[in-house]
């Protein structure tokens, strides 16, 4: 637990980072601010939308291939999940892996993480579950489990890796390489390039849940940092950037407004967009090259029959 001075230092750093993003040529806010309690629930709703293909496709791949995955992982592993959310896909692993030593879900969305870990404890009363509230882009210590694991498996589903720029994704893969340790591995969900139409539909759902998820980020900031964004004056924009191979989410201001962020006043022009998320889509070859730069070798790739999504098992080279 952080003491109040350490907690204030974290808030000050985050405020500085927020101001830096909002004073760039193209204003941007980190997608980590999507995830307060409401944001995590809205994300869960997104995963159930008919247009949002990644979740069901990844779940299908996991279920179809759990025997092979369990064979590669082996017995008595420690499972460390980055950005665990509701740990929905993790059930496949918790049921399918042999004698798991410990499960460590890591997430920034505290209430949601605690509630999800409690629910998991009901389902798996004998499993050592140690939830960890942390920003996984910053250094953090892993807890000590009751039983010594034979190896570490870092689990990073959902293609959350796609929400990082290529430089940041590479840095994160290097962190995971370190967390996996000697003999460890990374099991990762990676969304693949496909028709722009399918992609744009997935991020512009007809029920407007993704729009609510996008706008909720500003409510979160207003509460956490005492900013005064006029949330209703922003509209959701999601489009595929073909050259960059990514979906880009923005919040577009319908009127000019000046927002106080700490001691800095930020003016947002009418029609100006704030970039809130990238969601990169990879080719298998492109992802494998990035993994190699981080010191990983792709040992196995599973996909669905339409090659919409992939689950990959990466070992340390
Ligand atoms: N793994 C789940 C959830 C994906 S949503 C799935 O596949 O469906 C992304 C998750 O990562 C959210 O739960 C969010 O709270 C968490 N997250 C995003 N940025 C984070 C960060 N910097 N540190 C820790 N958790 C983060
Ligand atoms: C968590 N992440 C992988 C999701 C994605 O598809 O990039 C977040 C999301 N944003 C809008 N819809 C879902």
Image: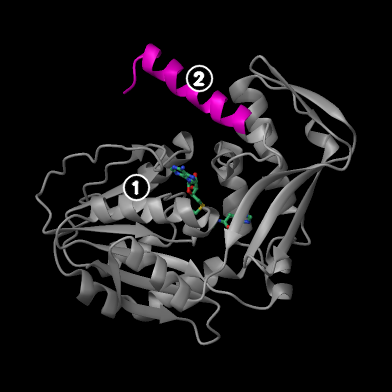
The residue furthest bottom is 305
Position of 207 compared to 202: left or right?
right
Q: Give the range drawn in magenta.
A: 1-20
Above-or-below relation of 300 to 34: below
Q: Mark 2 points at which residue?
A: 12
Q: x and y percent of residue 96 in the render?
A: 27, 70
Residue 193 vs residue 50, the one in the foreground: 193
- 213 inside magenta stretch: no
Above-or-below relation of 38 to 122: above
- Quadrant including the C terminus: bottom left
Q: Mark 1 points at which residue?
A: 105
Residue 298 vs residue 205, the one in the foreground: 298
- Can residue 102 be seen here? The reply is yes
Label 1, secondary structure: give it: strand
Q: x and y percent of residue 284 in the render?
A: 46, 77
- Quadrant including the N terminus: top left
| Residue at left offset 44%, top offset 58% | 88
Q: How far apart are marks 1 and 2 (CA)?
A: 26 Å
- 11 inside magenta stretch: yes
Determine whether label 1 and label 2 are within 8 Å by CB: no
């Amino acid at each position: 637990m952080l003491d109040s001075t350490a907690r204030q230092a974290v808030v000050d750093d985050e405020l500085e980072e927020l101001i830096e993003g909002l004073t760039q040529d193209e204003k941007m806010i980190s997608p980590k601010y999507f995830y307060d309690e409401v944001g995590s629930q809205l994300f869960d709703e997104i995963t159930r939308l008919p247009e949002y293909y990644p979740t069901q496709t990844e779940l299908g791949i996991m279920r179809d291939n759990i025997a092979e995955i369990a064979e590669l992982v082996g017995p008595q592993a420690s499972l460390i999940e980055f950005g665990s959310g509701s740990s929905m896909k993790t059930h496949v692993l918790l049921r399918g892996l042999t004698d798991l030593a410990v499960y460590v879900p890591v997430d920034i969305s505290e209430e949601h993480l605690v509630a999800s870990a409690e629910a998991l404890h009901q389902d798996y009363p004998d499993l050592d579950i140690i939830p960890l509230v942390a920003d996984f882009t910053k250094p953090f210590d892993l807890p000590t489990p009751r039983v010594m694991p034979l190896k570490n498996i870092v689990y990073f589903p959902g293609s959350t890796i796609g929400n990082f720029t290529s430089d940041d994704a590479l840095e994160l893969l290097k962190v995971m390489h370190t967390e996996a340790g000697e003999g460890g591995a990374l099991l990762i969900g990676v969304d693949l390039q496909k028709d722009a139409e399918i992609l744009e539909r997935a991020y512009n759902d007809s029920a407007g849940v993704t729009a609510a998820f996008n706008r909720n980020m500003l409510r979160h900031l207003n509460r956490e940092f005492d900013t005064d964004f006029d949330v209703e004056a922003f509209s959701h924009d999601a489009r595929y950037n073909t050259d960059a191979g990514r979906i880009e989410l923005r919040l577009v201001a319908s009127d000019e407004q000046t927002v106080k962020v700490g001691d800095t006043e930020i003016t947002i022009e009418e029609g100006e967009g704030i970039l809130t998320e990238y969601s990169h889509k990879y080719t298998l070859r492109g992802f494998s090259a990035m993994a190699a730069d981080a010191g990983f070798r792709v040992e196995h790739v599973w996909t669905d029959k339409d090659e919409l999504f992939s689950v990959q098992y990466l070992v340390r080279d």
